[in-house]
Image (cartoon, rainbow, N blue to C red):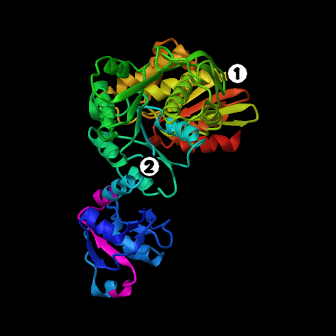
Amino acid sequence: MDIKVKDILKICNGELIVGNEEIICENFSKDTRTIQKNDVYVGIKGDNFDGNTLYEQAFEKGAKVCILQGIIASDEVKNKYNDRCIIVVDNTIKALQQIASYKRSLYNIPVIAITGSVGKTSTKDIVASVVGTSYDVLKTEGNMNNHIGLPMTILKLKNHNALVVEMGMNNLGEISLLSKIAKPNIAIITNVGTAHIGNLGSRENILKAKLEILDGLQEDGTLIINNDNDLLNGWLKNYNGKVKVRTYGIENKSDITATNVELNESTSQFELNVSGEEHAYNGKKINVPVGGKHFVYNALCAISAGKILGIKIDNIKSGIEGFQLSKNRMEIYKAKSITIVNDCYNANFDSMKAAIESITKMVGKRKIAILGDMLELGEYSKDLHYNVGLELAKNNIDILITVGNESENIARAAIDSKMNPDNIYVFDKNEEAISFIKNIVTDDDVVLIKASNGMKFIEIVNEIKKFI
């Protein structure tokens, strides 16, 4: 399954400026700061710098191949690096995607692709944990879920026999591209909410964007959807296509349904019901090591994928019970008698609602919500932030602290909903909030910290950890 320089030249219609066509290209990197000896360096032109101009740094750090655009190598450079390879292409991002698509085609393995408005990463983690009980799994790490990150993940395939990838998007057409590169056997849509509604204009358009995951789904592939999501449920009722669809849910009868659900502070339990058949999964009790109803959905999704792959129920249970969340996503930190819930990686209305509901079930004297702006909501921003404030009042949050212009609408709704205004504090900057928080957090408090990643709420998390 080796990819050689000559393969890249053919795939990308590239030009070999210097080097040997027989060199094997194994590990790919786009960052000269972390590049390793014998890596293939791909120069990416970003908003603030052009990685193509850094190819000599890549060579000095040991890269053996550079794939570049817009570079004219001098004779001096060619002579200096005549034991390496320089490939010039029209567009390095497109070339990266083409190489990844080619590499994917070399592997006859299960590929599971996951998208959704909320819960992509946690679902990816739990699905990978379940599949990992029976396969050697490669999965998306960090936020590598876009038009660059997904190809970089696929190019890490080596001796793996399963791949679990996350697919993010901001606009129509982006999931379609990713799906055609990954060519999944199993596609998963966790839900359709309000994330990126500012770009897409409506939840119906968000549904359309998420369904693009079908564009690359293999002919014998299966789509797994959350049957309790209103738009996905409605879509399925009117669907007449050929793709196999499997459902999971709690409220609506589904192919995989959770019954007798018990939600606790840091865990959840439920019993399985498999529709239409006597099955070994039926009646099995599943323990989820994270609190919150949304993690029951994640577990059901993982069970659905495991069932399709023929994984034994005991292995599925083991995978669910042993999964770990990615950093900064409902990460619970306890010091003394204070509980900090760090969910500051990202935020939209659906994930805000789920996080607020989760902390209400945690044991503590007071429930404190430190919330910041949800970004990329466009004209819907005011209403969606206001709706978060309604959820706070509904769930009896004791103290609200907001940071950011849009989050003032959260505070306004909380006041309108009769939450005590003396317990609502509004700040413009993280630094101001941190100074105040140091004087208000005390023993037995449960503190939720959540905002879109651009609000840099990790600063608040780190400062709170210092003084508790």
Q: Nearer the viewer, mark 2 or mark 1?
A: 2
* 299 left or right, relative to 247: right
Q: Residue at x 33, y 49 (%)?
A: 181
Tell me the crowding category of disc 1: few under 14, some 14 to 19, or many 20 or more residues within 10 angstroms, Cα based: some
- Type of the residue with mark 1: Lys
- Residue 30 horizontal/vertical position (percent): 41, 62
Tell me the crowding category of disc 2: few under 14, some 14 to 19, or many 20 or more residues within 10 angstroms, Cα based: some
Occupied quadrant, residue 80: bottom left
Occupied quadrant, residue 422: top right
- Residue 73 horizontal/vertical position (percent): 28, 79
Numbered range of the magenta stretch: 79-97
Q: Which mark is residue 125?
A: none
Q: Which mark is residue 144?
A: 2
- Residue 400 horizontal/vertical position (percent): 55, 25
Q: Which residue corresponds to mark 1? A: 365
Q: Name the residue furthest front.
A: 278
Q: Secondary structure at mark 1?
A: loop
CA–CA distance between discs 2 and 1? Answer: 38 Å
Instruction: Say whether residue 5 is visible.
Output: yes
Indicate yes or no whether the magenta region holds residue 80: yes
- Residue 457 horizontal/vertical position (percent): 52, 41
Q: Name the residue furthest right.
A: 336
Q: Secondary structure at mark 2?
A: loop
* 446 left or right, relative to 201: right
